[in-house]
Image: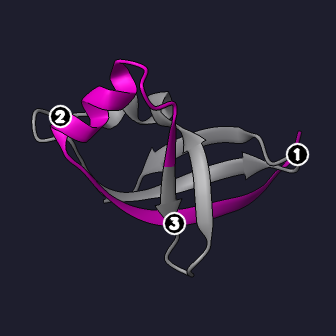
């Protein structure tokens, strides 16, 4: 599959908010991209970026040509 799109999002997720995803009461993150679109992706894809302070930073969300998540990359 050929990767065709990535969207840039700025995320600030508190530890308590991420805990809801971790415990399974929420499965997806809904975020607004820098260009104003809404994007939903699996919360577990952010697991490598969780710190004691939650998740904070700018991320590139990469999708393939079937709109399936390829990877999440922390930019800042």
49 over 64 or under it: above or below:
above
Q: Is the image coloured rainbow, by chain, by secondary structure, or in one colour? A: one colour
* Residue 60 in the figure: left or right of residue 18: right
- Earlier in the chain: of badge 1 and badge 2, it is 2
Q: Does the magenta stretch include residue 7?
A: yes
Q: Is mark 3 on a helix, strand or loop?
A: strand
**In contact (CB < 8 Å): disc 1 and disc 3:** no
Q: In which quarter of the image is the C terminus?
A: bottom left
* Magenta extent: 1-29
Q: Where is residue 2 in the image (x, y as percent from the top left)?
A: 86, 46
- Earlier in the chain: of badge 1 and badge 3, it is 3
Gap between marks 2 and 3 measured at Cα: 20 Å
Q: What residue do we see at 29% from left, 35% from top?
A: 18
Which residue bears the numbered disc 1?
A: 66
Which residue bears the numbered disc 2?
A: 51
11 over 26 or under it: above or below:
below
* Residue 42 in the figure: left or right of residue 46: right
Q: Position of residue 8 (x, y in %)?
A: 51, 66
């Amino acid at each position: 599959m050929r990767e065709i799109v990535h969207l840039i999002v700025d995320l600030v997720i508190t530890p308590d908010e991420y805990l809801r995803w971790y415990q399974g009461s929420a499965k997806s993150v809904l975020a607004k991209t820098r260009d104003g679109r809404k994007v939903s992706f699996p919360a577990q894809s952010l697991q490598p970026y969780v710190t004691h302070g939650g998740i904070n930073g700018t991320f590139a969300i990469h999708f393939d040509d079937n709109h399936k998540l390829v990877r999440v990359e922390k930019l800042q």
